[in-house]
């Protein structure tokens, strides 16, 4: 089921990220087998040199997967890391995503973010 959902999200990937706007969900669905939880997905298209502002994801457990290009990321007090196409990382609820940006000044990057969160959480993307 999870693989089918991830495949669907990848097939439906669209450009939703504008540098000054909060991302808009691509897909959101209550999890029928986990009462009170919802899965929400975002696809972030980073233009060369583009950045997301520092942010948190409320009650969300996050799986971030680099669909293309390279993404520079720093979560909490961890190191700044560069993730390449096909690589991923996770974030725990309440983690601070201090750096989220395209690692290239010349090539675009695309990131799939899958958030599993409390269904009543309206703060799944909170900019500092």
Image (spheres, rainbow, N blue to C red):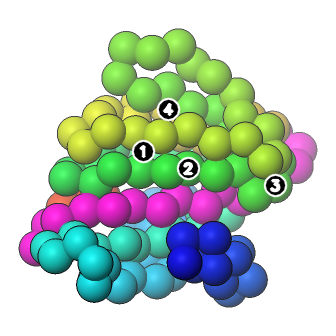
Looking at this rendering, what residue extends furthest in the right direction?
106
Tell me which numbered mark, 1 or 3, is placed earlier along the sequence.
1
Reply above or below: 28 against 40: below
Looking at the rendered image, the disc whose residue lies closer to the viewer, 4 or 3, is 3
- Which is closer to the viewer, label 4 or label 1? 4
Q: Dot 1: within a 10 Å radius of its alpha carbon, few (fewer than 14), some, or many (20 or more) residues?
A: some
Find disc 2 in the rendering and name its residue: 64
Residue 125 is a magenta residue: no
Residue 84 x, y percent position in the rendering: 79, 38
Q: Which residue is mark 1?
A: 53
Q: Earlier in the sequence, mark 2 or mark 1?
A: 1
Q: Is residue 70 above or below residue 38?
A: above
For mark 3, give the secondary structure.
Answer: strand
Give the CA distance from mark 1 to mark 3.
20 Å
Q: Nearer the viewer, mark 2 or mark 1?
A: 2
Q: Nearer the viewer, residue 14 or 4?
A: 4
Residue at which label 3 appears: 68
In the figure, is residue 45 to the left or right of 30?
right
Q: Residues within 10 Å of mark 4 (few under 14, many from 20)?
A: some
Please tell me which residue lies in front, 113 or 4: 4
Question: In the structure shown, which secondary structural element does the residue marked by tag 2 occupy?
Answer: strand
Q: Residues within 10 Å of mark 3 (few under 14, many from 20)?
A: some
Residue identifier under label 4: 99
- Of circles 2 and 4, which is in front? 2
**Mark toward the start of the polypeptide (4 vs 1):** 1
Left or right: where 7 falls relative to 20: right
Rendering coords of residue 39 (x, y %): 36, 72
Report whether residue 49 is seen. Answer: no
Magenta highlight range: 105-122
């Amino acid at each position: 089921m999870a693989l089918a959902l991830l495949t669907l999200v990848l097939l439906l990937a669209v450009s939703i990220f504008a540098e000054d706007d909060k991302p808009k969900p691509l897909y959101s669905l209550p999890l029928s087998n986990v009462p009170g939880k919802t899965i929400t997905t975002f696809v972030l298209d980073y233009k060369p040199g583009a950045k997301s502002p520092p942010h948190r994801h409320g009650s969300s457990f996050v799986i971030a997967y680099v669909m293309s290009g390279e993404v520079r990321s720093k979560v909490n007090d961890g190191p700044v890391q560069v993730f390449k196409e096909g690589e991923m990382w996770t974030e725990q609820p309440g983690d601070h995503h201090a750096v989220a940006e395209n690692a290239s000044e010349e090539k675009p990057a695309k990131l799939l973010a899958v958030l599993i969160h409390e269904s009543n959480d309206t703060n799944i993307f909170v900019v500092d």
